[in-house]
Image (spheres, rainbow, N blue to C red):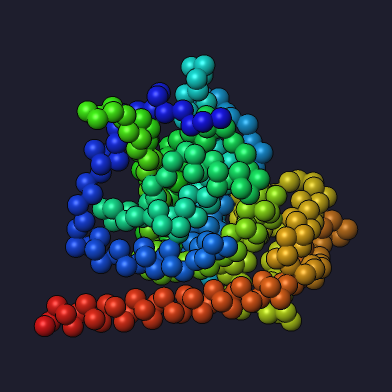
Amino acid sequence: MEEKNNDERPTSFEDTLDVTESKHDIENRMQMQLFASATSDRSTNTIHIYDIAPKFSYNESPSNVSETAFRNRSMRVAGDEYPVEIQAARIKRNNGEEVLIWPGEREECIEDSLRKLATSGQGILVNGEAGVRFTLYQLRTELKNHKHTYSYDQLREGLYVLRRAGLRITNPLTGESWEEGFLSRLVEGGQRGVKDGPSYEPWYASFHKLVTKSITDLTYRQMNYPRLMSIPGQLAKYIYKRMVAVYTFADLDKPYQPSLIQILEESGRGVSPDMKINIKAMNRALSQLKAQGATAHSEELKRVKQGRKVLNIRYNIFPTQQFVSEIIEANKQQKKHRANAKKTMIQQIKSTIS
């Protein structure tokens, strides 16, 4: 099936954005280049705070537009509780039906693939926004290479869900809120009529401001991309991203020790009234992580009970040697890029003084 472009909107990337670089853009372009150079063909970058936020839904059908479009969740970062608000995307389908769609597995796969394309030479920083230029064919191929197959119509809808769905994360220490779409800007590509014949323009998407902030602040970390895309379950994928982001001291003898309730709540999956369902979901996720080489084995460390009723479980999750090596390399890369950024900044200051 070939990419269909004749029904796409005529707005071009150049017509929509002011591509003239400001001084701020020139200064930040270095960070965008570092963001790309921090990865290889087999890696991508995880984003501080953003990637561990409970922003995706699990196995959820579209809702009627008469239902509420807002959900409130929270997550803990370094002991502080960050409020998170998600707004569903209002989408009009081809049959004219309007529905509310919560970003889910499809949208997570699309976002992860867009970020990978951004580190593969297609990322740009325009007007202070980190973004990526791509074609639907490139996006579809990238997903298909990792066994995630979507039609062009499904990809279009997923992209517009990411653009129209809202995400607000608030820092409880400063009161600062980061609020906008999962994709803050989306310019649809496709066929353009020009004097010398038709041409094809790529799509453009800019990421949430927390992604840009992580790039400019150099708080992102390297992550094994093939493994990320091979993990079949959303919960397992969330645990993997969380381990890469916060388990920076990874050691064969020092396991990662999350609790069942924390993982279920902060992943966005939620806690079922039936504890057996919760335990089964966690055990399945841990098995998937082991199958993909992220963990060696896992065990229950402690069950918190009220009488015979299980209230919570704390786990020991032991990493593989490969995962530990990847974390050590990620630590080295982050330190290296921060040093390079500092060195370049000093050189720029000296040049300005001269």
- Looking at the image, which residue is at 68% across and 54% down? 231
Residue placed at 58% from the left, 41% from the top? 106
Q: Is residue 79 left or right of residue 322?
A: left
Residue at (38, 32) in percent of width and height: 190
Whole-percent x, y for residue 42 in the image: 57, 62
| Residue 71 place in picture, x, y as percent | 53, 42
Name, please, the residue furthest toward the top.
95
On screen, residue 347 versus residue 255, left or right, reads left
Q: Residue at x 54, y 62 (%)?
A: 41
How many labels sit on residues?
Answer: 0
Is residue 313 placed above or below 4 in the rendered structure? below
Outermost residue to the front: 196
Q: Which of the pair 128/301 is nearer the observer?
A: 128
Where's the C terminus, which quadrant?
bottom left
* Quadrant of the drawing holding the N terminus: top right
| Residue 148 placement (x, y as % from top left) | 63, 43
Q: Is residue 29 left or right of residue 239?
A: left
The reply to whether residue 69 is visible in this rendering is: no
- Looking at the image, the residue that sits furthest to the left is 354
Q: Position of residue 264 (x, y in %)?
A: 67, 54
Task: Out of 233 and 36, give the one closest to the viewer.
Answer: 36
Q: Locate residue 169: give its quadrant.
A: bottom left
Q: Is residue 163 visible?
A: yes
Q: Of residues 52 and 218, which is closer to you in this image?
A: 218
